[in-house]
């Protein structure tokens, strides 16, 4: 049995996953399990090739995917209908925002199970912020206050080599649409209109938010295109803020001599909106070992294993029961994340949105390269977004919002 997964813990994924999956091997001594790790972009490309792949040995049995990809796999007839394998399968024990992305639209057929999720939040070093503000929670509540704080921190720590006010939440150091969307939503705009008939990339509020996000790199408030750990990290004392979708419980480790607090993400509008991103497990229709593959999915989805994996990867379990165990394990964490989850939002269950986010990430990659070359401008961004909007509008027209 072959499992394709994404780099959940960056460069340590293969080692971490191998150790974790040994539990399945021990409980299922006759089962063979081969794990391959792909970047999100490479996995995206490989999935589209699966429809034409005839060599069963080259095909995966189980694939880990972002939850918004599920409709694509269903449309391309790549994902197996899990309800046919287990008519009693239900999703009522999972967190509500993750459930719609597991069904085939307008049916009760389940094609994926949620494995884990993350949600954007802002962590800050108490000792660092005390040097620049008497009220971090107030300053960091708005986008303007956030930028003002970044400026003050950059000046305060100007003599610290490789210091950046904000640690990059992407392990590769990319500018990411997933980290930008909370500001877009907070401003009251979105990738498309509510009827999925028009792309909103060129809307002024959208451009303003995206330009402001890229400004973090332009003003060197955040490092880009360098892998996490090489520069600008909070643990090393070379960053003070961390906008991430991960738990941040690493900062609770007693070996660190500093305290970190967590807040909702800064907002460009009236309310903070956290980005909820789910990770689903899908069984491939062409699998030659569906019984073992489905057993593996159910093993990964078990409450004890979900909680253990979520803790290992610094993410959150997708089951309500295990998520509650996480947030109730600390009164401070409960108060913080209960508020963040209440303001959380996932992308809609729509066939075109995965492509729209991919187009946005490609635009952000080109902007990042321009930032490093010192040639970035808002005019360049507007031009790129205009081209991107045409692509998305074509897809929306093609699939009619399905």
Image: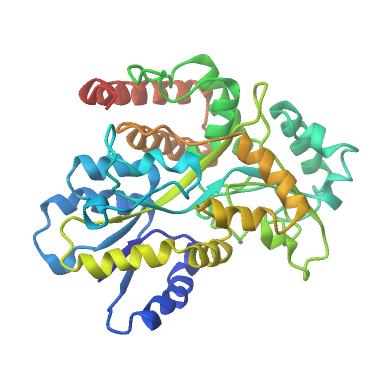
In the displayed structure image, the side of residue 47 where residue 188 appears, left or right: right
Quick check: can you spot residue 251? yes
Quick check: can you spot residue 37? no
In the displayed structure image, the side of residue 377 where residue 50 appears, left or right: left
Residue 179, x across and y down, in percent: 54, 40
Q: Is residue 274 above or below residue 191?
A: below
- For the point 31% across and 58% down, the residue is 63
| Among the 4 quarters of the image, the one containing residue 59 | bottom left
In the displayed structure image, the side of residue 43 where residue 13 appears, left or right: right
Q: Which residue occupies the foreground of this view, 149 or 323?
A: 323
- For the point 59% across and 22% down, the residue is 187
State the quadrant of the C terminus.
top left
Q: Which residue occupies the foreground of this view, 331 or 44?
A: 331
| Among the 4 quarters of the image, the one containing residue 295 | bottom left
Residue 292, x across and y down, in percent: 26, 70
Q: Is residue 193 above or below residue 182?
A: above
| Among the 4 quarters of the image, the one containing residue 201 | top left
Q: Is residue 397 above or below residue 173?
A: above
- For the point 72% across and 56% down, the residue is 234
Residue 92, x across and y down, in percent: 44, 46
State the quadrant of the N terminus.
bottom left
Residue 169, x across and y down, in percent: 58, 49
């Amino acid at each position: 049995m072959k499992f394709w997964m994404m780099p959940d813990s960056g460069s340590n994924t293969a080692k971490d996953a191998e150790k974790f999956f040994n539990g399945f091997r021990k409980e299922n001594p006759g089962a063979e399990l081969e794990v391959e790790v792909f970047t999100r972009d490479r996995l995206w490309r490989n999935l589209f090739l699966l429809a034409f792949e005839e060599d069963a040995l080259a095909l995966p049995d189980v694939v880990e995917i972002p939850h918004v990809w599920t409709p694509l796999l269903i449309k391309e007839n790549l994902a197996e209908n899990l309800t046919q394998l287990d008519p009693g399968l239900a999703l009522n024990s999972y967190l509500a925002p993750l459930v719609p992305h597991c069904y085939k639209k307008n049916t009760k057929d389940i094609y994926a199970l949620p494995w884990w999720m993350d949600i954007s939040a802002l962590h800050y070093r108490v000792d660092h912020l005390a040097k620049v503000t008497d009220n971090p929670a107030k300053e960091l509540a708005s986008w303007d206050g956030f930028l003002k704080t970044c400026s003050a921190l950059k000046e305060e720590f100007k003599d610290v080599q490789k210091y950046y006010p904000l640690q990059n939440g992407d392990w590769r150091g990319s500018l990411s649409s997933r980290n930008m969307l909370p500001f877009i939503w907070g401003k009251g705009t979105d990738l498309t209109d509510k009827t999925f008939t028009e792309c909103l990339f060129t809307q002024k509020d959208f451009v303003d938010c995206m330009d402001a996000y890229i400004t973090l790199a332009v003003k060197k408030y955040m490092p880009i295109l360098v892998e996490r750990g090489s520069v600008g990290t909070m643990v090393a004392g070379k960053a003070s803020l961390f906008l991430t979708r991960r738990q941040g419980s690493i900062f609770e480790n007693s070996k660190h001599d500093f305290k970190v607090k967590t807040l909702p993400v800064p907002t460009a509008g009236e309310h903070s909106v956290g980005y909820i991103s789910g990770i689903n497990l899908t069984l491939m229709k062409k699998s030659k070992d569906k019984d073992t593959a489905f057993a593996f999915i159910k093993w990964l989805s078990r409450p004890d294993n979900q909680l253990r994996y979520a803790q290992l990867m610094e993410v959150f379990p997708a089951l309500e029961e295990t998520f509650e165990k996480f947030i109730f394990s600390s009164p401070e964490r409960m108060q913080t994340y209960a508020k963040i989850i209440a303001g959380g939002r996932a992308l809609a269950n729509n066939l075109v949105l995965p492509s729209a986010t991919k187009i946005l990430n490609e635009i952000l990659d080109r902007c990042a390269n321009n930032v490093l070359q010192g040639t970035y401008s808002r005019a360049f961004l507007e031009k790129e977004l205009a081209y991107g909007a045409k692509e998305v509008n074509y897809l929306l027209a093609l699939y009619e919002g399905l």
